[in-house]
């Protein structure tokens, strides 16, 4: 099991109360911040980008701890996701808020990494497809390689907001393109 | 002279008011001076007649006593003694001779004589108790008895009603007197002495007791009664809380080992109450537990919940008592605790208890805590929740139950 290879960044993950969302405000705030760390740590280790509010999700790591015999309720899972969205570590993918994209790196961090790669590898002022950024050989050794389209788009939009790139909409998501500007421009 | 007897299922049907006097066995009889005796069986004498069953025919025959004028014992040379009955009409009617065992003869004679004198048949005459036999007779008797009982009960209730009315009037009078007694406290010395004498008389004659007077004068004479009660309650709570603190801080010291040097009856009662299961847990006592404990300790002259609440509020307003009332978060539960106890101290005790019992990263349920503190589960739960609200405890809500743990979430910040 994947959860066997992963070890939690906090020892609290093994304590039963960690799996009950605490009613006292200050304690709950602290607990949710610890959960945020745990989820980001797990998703980074597993290269997981989405969390569904579902029993299947709640039954698997990191929301289920077989050793402590505890698992989160769906309500608890939703509270953690809401907290992550609130703190910029996730975004709801649907109106019903049943699927969340996890930002184990915040979009600004992804944007910075992508721009650094573009400028380091001489891709400034030329157009790249989003597909080549995600799947291309040039980015194979990059952290953002394999990033889902939705998250990549959000990162590039952040870059666009800084005036460092421009996104071109293609006929399909694979044909979307981006042009990186040199910082002087 | 002797008649056929009406029977019911082979037994003679009794006359109204007829009672059996004696059995005569054996029995033989004859009418007139000559002739032989005829044998009879199952002979018996009743208040109304002499009757027997004829040998061989199983028919019942009888001689009605109202037709007998006289009876005597005669003896003859050849046949020994016999009882002779002399019919009243006609005057020349032949006498009837009866024989039985020699030893029974005198008894038979005296019974017949007595029956003739009593003449019970004169009351109802010779009226058959037709179709009143067996079960229906029993039922009728019972009905009669019940009517009689009802009558008795009604009379008794009437008496009671009268007594109550009198008691009401007496209580009203006692109240009135004590009111005027207390309202006139400022009156002159002579009048005062008179009133003291009056109240003393009332107590002496059982028209009032001291507490009743106090209670009755409560509204008029201010808070005297409540001040007393507040004082008593305060002292009681102090004792219970003191016990509970020694219990929880030194659980290994059994109370029975301690010499009961200060053991007045009060302390024994407190200890007994605690052994019964309730006590002040963690230096705190729920008011509804206190209500039970205090009334159990008093035994008589119990107080009402309202009295408890008023007196407890007075006790807690008095700084010398060193007690505080505490309303728990849900707003409906009141508890009393010593003034030096606060939520943080209480929570610290709970954390220490949990760590001692379940380990540093272990949890306890409210009922486990209640057992350890010897207090009610509701008090334990309220304290745990208060400790949680202050950030000292965290919960583990599972299908098995609700467990409380030390709040470890801030461990890394320390």
Image (cartoon, coloured by chain):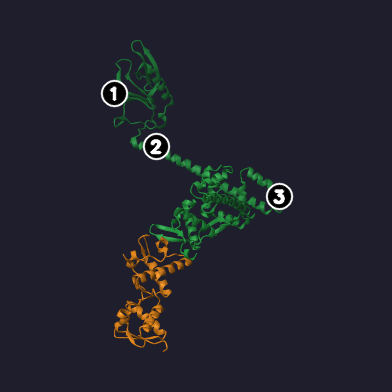
Chain colours: A orange, B green
Q: Label 1, label 2: how many angstroms apart (C-alpha)? A: 32 Å
Q: Nearer the viewer, mark 3 or mark 1?
A: 3
Residue B389: give x, y in percent of width and height: 49, 63
Residue where numbered disc 2 is placed: B141
Which of the two discs, 3 and 2, labels the residue nearer the N terminus? 2
| Closer-to-camera residue (A118/B268) | A118
Q: Give the residue drawn at x 26%, y 25%.
A: B57
- Report the number of discs: 3
Q: Is residue A30 left or right of residue A100?
A: right
Q: Give the residue drawn at x 42%, y 84%.
A: A162
Residue A58: give x, y in percent of width and height: 35, 66
Q: Give the residue drawn at x 63%, y 51%.
A: B176
Residue B186: give x, y in percent of width and height: 71, 54
Q: Label 3, label 2: how many angstroms apart (C-alpha)? A: 66 Å
Dot 2, crowdedness within 10 Å: few (<14), some or many (≥20)?
few
Residue where numbered disc 1 is placed: B54
Q: Residue furthest left?
A: B56
Residue B192 is labelled as: 3
Q: Dot 1: what SS?
A: strand
Q: Dot 2: what SS?
A: helix
Q: Is residue B238 left or right of residue A118?
A: right
């Amino acid at each position: 099991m994947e959860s066997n290879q992963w070890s939690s960044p906090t020892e609290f993950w093994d304590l039963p109360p960690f799996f009950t969302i605490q009613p006292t405000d200050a304690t709950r705030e602290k607990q949710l911040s610890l959960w945020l760390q745990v989820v980001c740590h797990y998703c980074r280790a597993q290269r997981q980008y989405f969390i569904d509010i579902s029993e299947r999700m709640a039954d698997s790591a990191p929301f289920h701890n077989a050793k402590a015999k505890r698992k989160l309720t769906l309500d608890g899972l939703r509270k953690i996701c809401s907290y992550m969205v609130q703190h910029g570590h996730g975004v709801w993918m649907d109106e019903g808020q049943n699927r969340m994209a996890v930002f184990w790196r915040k979009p600004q961090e992804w944007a910075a990494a992508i721009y650094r790669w573009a400028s380091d590898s001489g891709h400034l002022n030329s157009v790249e497809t989003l597909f080549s950024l995600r799947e291309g050989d040039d980015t194979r050794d990059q952290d953002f390689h394999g990033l889902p389209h939705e998250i990549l788009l959000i990162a590039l939009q952040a870059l666009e907001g800084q005036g460092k790139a421009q996104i071109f909409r293609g006929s399909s998501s694979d044909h979307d393109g981006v042009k990186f500007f040199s910082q002087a421009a | 002279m002797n008649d056929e007897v009406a029977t019911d299922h082979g037994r003679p049907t009794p006359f109204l008011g007829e009672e059996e006097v004696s059995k005569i066995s054996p029995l033989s009889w004859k009418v007139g001076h000559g002739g032989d005796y005829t044998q009879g069986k199952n002979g018996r004498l009743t208040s109304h007649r002499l009757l027997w069953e004829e040998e061989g025919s199983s028919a019942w025959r009888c001689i009605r006593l109202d037709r007998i004028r006289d009876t005597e014992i005669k003896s003859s040379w050849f046949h020994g003694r016999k009882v002779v009955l002399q019919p009243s009409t006609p005057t020349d009617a032949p006498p009837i001779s009866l024989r039985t065992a020699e030893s029974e003869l005198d008894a038979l004679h005296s019974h017949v004589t007595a029956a003739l004198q009593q003449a019970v048949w004169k009351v109802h005459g010779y009226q058959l108790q037709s179709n009143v036999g067996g079960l229906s007779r029993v039922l009728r008797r019972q009905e009669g008895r019940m009517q009689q009982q009802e009558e008795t009960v009604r009379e008794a209730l009437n008496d009671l009603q009268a007594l109550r009315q009198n008691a009401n009037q007496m209580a009203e009078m006692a109240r009135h007197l004590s009111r005027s007694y207390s309202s006139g406290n400022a009156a002159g010395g002579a009048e005062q002495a008179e009133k003291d004498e009056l109240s003393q008389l009332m107590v002496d004659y059982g028209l009032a007791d001291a507490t009743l007077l106090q209670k009755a004068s409560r509204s008029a004479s201010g808070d005297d009664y409540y001040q007393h009660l507040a004082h008593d309650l305060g002292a009681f709570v102090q004792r219970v809380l003191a016990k509970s603190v020694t219990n929880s801080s030194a659980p290994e010291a059994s109370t029975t080992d301690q010499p009961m040097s200060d053991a007045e009856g009060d302390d024994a009662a407190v200890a007994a109450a605690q052994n019964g299961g309730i006590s002040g847990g963690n230096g705190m006592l729920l008011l509804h537990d206190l209500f039970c404990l205090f009334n159990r300790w008093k035994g008589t002259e119990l107080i009402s919940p309202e009295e408890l609440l008023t007196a407890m509020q007075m006790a807690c307003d008095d700084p010398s008592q060193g007690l505080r009332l505490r309303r728990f978060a849900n707003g409906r539960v009141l508890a009393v605790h010593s003034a030096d106890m606060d939520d943080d101290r209480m929570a610290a005790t709970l954390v220490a208890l949990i760590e001692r019992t379940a380990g540093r990263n272990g949890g306890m349920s409210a009922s486990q805590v209640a057992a350890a503190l010897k207090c009610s589960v509701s008090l334990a739960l309220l304290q745990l929740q208060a400790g949680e609200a202050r950030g000292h405890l965290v919960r583990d809500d599972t299908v098995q139950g609700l467990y409380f743990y030390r709040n470890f979430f801030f461990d890394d910040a320390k």
